[in-house]
Image (spheres, helix red, strand yellow):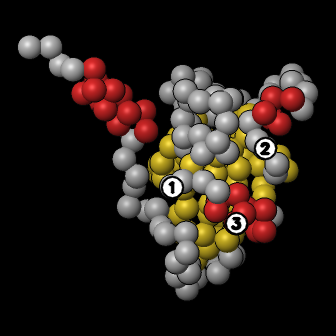
Amino acid sequence: MRPSWKVALLCLAVLLGGVPPAAVVAQNKAPDSGSARLFFLRHSTVVGIAVWPDIKVDGRSVGSLSPGSYIVVQRPAGRHTITISHWGDFGRYEADVQVAAGASYYYELGLNLRGGGGVLLPSLAGEVGTPMRGRVNSGGFRLNVLSAKTGAASVAKLKR
């Protein structure tokens, strides 16, 4: 008996999307004392729809971002390393951030357009944030920083 296409599709979704890790916290929950909340979001567009990059904080995966979704994690105040990679991309993006206790930080997934690329593609991808300089910047994605007001409004429109 052949496995159905539904089973194959489910297996593919689990492999590409992964299972949300326990480190992910609720958006409306206040951060624990001494901790900050980091939101990683991706706007709902068709640009890069088949690619779900993996987000890591301090070397540990916190999940993959599909279009129209977000991930929120809680981390202790201090310095942390954020890495974005994808199995089909031979590069990666890596940046260090300093976070304060009780604060929320919003990072938007952006397209890394090496060699220019203009403004059309980021606009089609829904990007509104300010590009963040990465320590390693060889992958197809990067992070943009959003203000708290813009970040909270963007997250309210997305699914988790």
Q: Could you tell me which residue is drawn at 81 percent across and 51 percent down?
A: 129
- Please, what secondary structure does the residue beneath circle 2 have? loop
Q: Please name the residue that numbered disc 2 is placed on.
A: 127
Q: Please name the residue that numbered disc 1 is placed on.
A: 160
- Local crowd size for mark 1, using a 10 Å CA cut-off: few (<14), some (14–19), many (≥20): some
Extreme residue toward the top, this view = 2
- When the figure is inspected, residue 129 is found, relative to residue 11, above or below; the finding is below
Please count the marks in the image: 3
- Local crowd size for mark 3, using a 10 Å CA cut-off: few (<14), some (14–19), many (≥20): some
* Front-most of residues 73 and 98: 73
Spot occupied by residue 29 in the image (x, y as percentages of width and height): 52, 77
Q: Do the residues labelled 1 and 3 touch (CB within 8 Å)?
A: no
Amino acid type, mark 1: Arg
- When the figure is inspected, residue 153 is found, relative to residue 141, above or below; the finding is below
Q: Taking 104 as reference, is 121 left or right?
A: right
Q: Could you tell me which residue is drawn at 38 percent across and 33 percent down?
A: 13
Q: Do the residues labelled 2 and 3 touch (CB within 8 Å)?
A: no
- Local crowd size for mark 2, using a 10 Å CA cut-off: few (<14), some (14–19), many (≥20): many
Q: Are marks 2 and 1 in contact (CB under 8 Å)?
A: no
Q: Taking 133 as reference, is 142 left or right?
A: left
Q: Taking 139 as reference, is 86 left or right?
A: left
Alpha carbon of mark 1 to alpha carbon of mark 3: how far? 13 Å
Amino acid type, mark 3: Ala
Which is nearer the N-term, disc 2 or disc 1?
A: 2
Q: Please name the residue that numbered disc 3 is placed on.
A: 152
